[in-house]
Image (cartoon, helix red, strand yellow):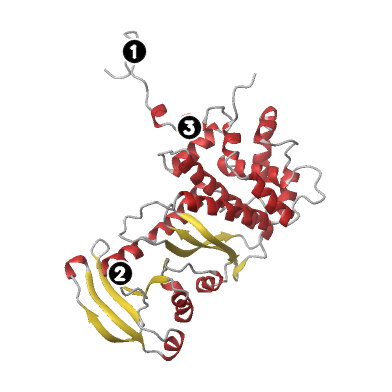
Amino acid sequence: MHTGQLVFSQLMDFLPWRRFDTCVQRYHGDRKIKSFPCSEHLRVMAFAQLTYRESLRDVETCLRAVKPKLYHMGLRGGVSRNNLANANQQRDWRIYADFAQVLIAEARTLYAETDLGLDLDATVYALDASTIDLCLAMFPWAKFRQAKGAVKMHTLLNLQGNIPEFILISDGKLHDVNVLDYLVPTPGAYYVMDRGYLDFARLHQLHQARAYFVTRAKKNFKFKRRYSHEVDKSTGVQCDQTIVLETYYSLQGYPEPLRRIRYYDESLDKRLVFLTNDFDLPAVTVAALYKSRWQIELFFKWIKQHLRIKAFYGTSQNAVKAQIWIAVSVYLLVAIVKKRLGIQLSLYTILQILSVSIFEKTPLVKLFSAADYNNPPTDDPKQLLLFE
């Protein structure tokens, strides 16, 4: 008798599978594949992410233990370690990268009205990169230093909902600032970056695209002051200046005036100097914008702790990129489910619940109901007391 869908199947129903088929056809992902198509590969890898599996053998063992349930998970054939290894090696990682872009577009729409806590009616992006260390002996293609391997995950994070809208996976040698060449700026949006992205020629391209940037100045930064604006030093703002660059090559790269703000952060006991091309935004708001950049650091910390992107199931470049993109897709899927079902729990809590209830048949709304976590009161006089 049918008693409902598995939690895993309910979760997979939120994925736009027709769009996924389009991505598969674009790169001929199922060409000459008789069993274990890309859709099943995605399901198995999503299962591995949601249940924190350590290896392909671990995935195979767990799924074989629940063999009668595989059909209800959307897996028509058997799952073997050899099939998974071959799929990670041969299925084009761009399939999963393009599908992640589909989920990004959906999540961005759902979180478009999220309040950032700033008096600002514009999209705010944080740009940063995180290095994922690899063993050079096992990943010889990922050369970083003489005896160290790594890949970099360059991410443009939309702070409305912490949705990654752009991700570039490169080798560890690619400098962070080069990622600005891959961005398509959104007019009117704010791009918040640290000092690693301070390249005036590239920042001027953002300015010409009518986008705004907020970054920090380096210690050896040279400039000429044109005008000083009045400031309220009780807010932490020590100066607000209109400046022009003094160094020859910097001036050639950015020939227009910039705004320089020096701010004292009392909580850190630290003086920070910001540069921006927005001359209308209050100086305190500029400081708050840069402080919001910390969200991308938390994003990197979160996905490294709760998703499998530090230990990989394959050693080829294709396997590593496919696993990272599938991990990002799982993150986006959980964020989409959270918004569509109106779940008030954090993403961490949702993932923890899913990891232990993936084979249950409880409806998702009931599974994440906060009321279910409260123990019902009992008036049974025969109930023994643990502490008296």
Which label number is shown at residue 365?
Answer: 3
Mark toward the start of the polypeptide (2 vs 3): 2
Q: Is residue 37 left or right of residue 273?
A: right
> Could you say where residue 266 lies in the image, as x and y percent from the top left?
23, 63
Query: Is residue 55 visible from the viewing direction of this image?
Result: no
| Res. 256 image quadrant | bottom left
> From the viewer's perspective, is the residue at label 2 or at label 3 nearer?
2
Q: Amino acid at mark 3?
A: Val
Q: Amino acid at mark 2?
A: Leu
Tell me the distance, in whole angstroms, between the alpha carbons under discs 1 and 2: 64 Å
Q: Amino acid at mark 1?
A: Leu
Vertical arrangement, residue 146 with respect to residue 6, above or below:
below
User: Circle 2 sits in a helix, a strand or a loop, which is it?
Assistant: loop
Mark toward the start of the polypeptide (3 vs 1): 3
The residue furthest bottom is 248
Tell me the distance, in whole angstroms, between the alpha carbons under discs 3 and 1: 33 Å
Task: Confirm or deny contact between disc 2 and disc 3 (CB under 8 A).
Answer: no
> From the viewer's perspective, is the residue at label 1 or at label 2 nearer?
2
Which label number is shown at residue 19?
Answer: none
* Mark 2 burial class by Cα count in 10 Å: few <14, some 14-19, many 20+: few
* Mark 1 burial class by Cα count in 10 Å: few <14, some 14-19, many 20+: few
Tell me the distance, in whole angstroms, between the alpha carbons under discs 2 and 3: 42 Å
Vertical arrangement, residue 139 with respect to residue 329, above or below:
below
Between 219 and 182, the residue placed more toward the observer is 182
Check disc 2 and report the residue beneath it. 281
Between 31 and 122, the residue placed more toward the observer is 122
